[in-house]
Amino acid sequence: MISNKKLIHIDKILKKNLKQAINKKNYDFALRLIELSAHLKYNYAFDDTLYDEELENSLKQISNSLFKSEKIVPNEDVVLFYDYFGYDNRGLTQQYLRALLRLNKRIILVFESKNRHYKNEAILAEIEHYNNKEIYYLEGNDRIELCKSLINIILAEKPKHILMHLVPWDTIAYIAFYKIQGIIRYQINLTDHAFWLGVDITDINIEFRSFGQNLSEQLRKIPSHKNKILPYYPILSETPFQGFDFDTKNKKILFSGSTFYKILGNNLEFLETIHKILQLDDNLIFVFAGSGNGTSINKFIDDHKLNNRIFLIGDRYDLYEIMKNVDYYISTFPYIGALMTQIAVASGLPVFAYVHPKNLVSDIKDLFYKSDRFKSFDNLDTLVKEFSIEYKKNTPKSLYNNLMITEKEFSENLEKIFNGENPMSFLEKKYDVLESYQTFNSLMIEAENLYNPVFENTINKFLTSGERFRMFQDYKLRYYKKVFKENKILFLKTLYYQLTGKI
């Protein structure tokens, strides 16, 4: 079991070791500690802030120790797009690339790694026939070499604008972008509801809704003049429909999708709601696309004997085509899938979205700012009731594409942001977001302890077994108990070496 108290204690241990690592110039270890600390903050939101000055100052210190400051005279129409993910139809890579094409910018597309386990064919296809571009993959055997590779790319290309499409614990981009003067750095705030590194290297913070802007101003302490709102539109993939491996004849299909963690929380109220909806008609089924830890989901399906009513179909690249072949869409909660909901709206599906008044992380009305036709419900009984009414109507699909920003408008507004303007300031709404942030923290702790345990794997990802043993007392105790149970002679030897300082 984890708690905020335990996480704060672990973070203090990480930072104590971080200082020692920097003093010893053990920078690889130091960067792993920073990434781990940031990862835990991202996962659990256990701090009362979304800005960690100590982590950011540590990155600056490492950067200053390794690299000299460089000042460039930028080329006016050159934009470097740094894409950590490089993941087709996820994030906002393709939207920004299309905008840069429309603006006739020289595009410098930089991926963090060539050894990716997911596809980026659609991303590369966006600029395949565009001549004024260069594509790079960072090269190097460790984090420091990758930083150097990125710095060299910047010095060679001399961009005026850098669009940062970062993972929340990205240390490589931070170190490199911190050392270059003469550029303007734009944070594309993908995870606006959670922690990320990079506040101090952000010149302009591009939000997609007012909720994120309020979080940035109140909890990241980013001044209001640095924050700009730019809603996005969905990328509608042309991947052919891959079909379903179950019978859909004479069935009505309710569809949703996301990474699994987005529906784990509040005692699995999302699945409970689906169960209620399915009771409306035996010919209604629920299909869910996505991946993650499905243990709790599969248990719920088995416990409620819903194996022929709920179908998990995994990650799919044909989401737009799927939505043309289903009848209704329900947005995920307690965390909404904004892009998925946009695709559903673009497909003409009736959309049912739930936003708890104390959890505004799921409020995405700013993405449908052109009309009030996009509705969300503030309680689940109303959602089920309205679904029942819609189900009985059996009305045909209707296209609501005109609710969202267009590709052309997106590029025009990005150009205005490049020129120092704030073109969509009319979307700004000021309100207190602390309660929503605290709700997010409670939900993530609940998910970790009951449904989706990732804490141990996160620790193990960044630290070796020896490092864990030296840093954390509970790891030592668990190790000693295991050895004592399996081999008492080895236990005595281990204890001797520990007490004498030889381990």
Image (tube, helix red, strand yellow):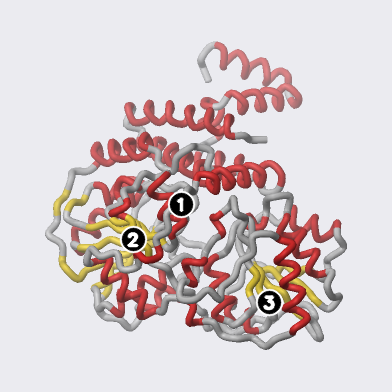
Residue type at mark 2 is Lys
> Which residue shows up at 57% across the image and 16% down it?
497
Residue 81: percent from left, percent from top: 32, 64
User: Which corner quadrant of the image does residue 304 belong to?
Assistant: bottom right
Q: CA distance from mark 2 to mark 3?
A: 33 Å
Residue 154: percent from left, percent from top: 23, 58
In the image, 259: left or right of 272? left
Foreground residue among 358 and 251: 358
**Marks 2 and 1: which is nearer the front?**
1
Foreground residue among 345 and 305: 345
Instruction: For residue 45, say whether it is visible.
Output: yes
> Which residue shows up at 59% across the image and 78% down it?
318
Residue type at mark 3 is Tyr
Say if 179 sits above or below 428 in the image: above
Q: Residue furthest left?
A: 73
User: Which corner quadrant of the image does residue 166 belong to?
Assistant: bottom left
Q: CA distance from mark 3 to mark 1?
A: 32 Å
Q: Secondary structure at mark 1?
A: loop
Residue tagged 1:
431
Instruction: For residue 308, say whether it is visible.
Output: no
3 or 1: tag closer to the N-terminus = 3
Residue tagged 2:
228
Residue tagged 3:
328
Residue 429: percent from left, percent from top: 42, 58
**Location of the N terminus (image quadrant):** top right
2 or 3: tag closer to the N-terminus = 2
Say if 184 sits above or below 386 in the image: above
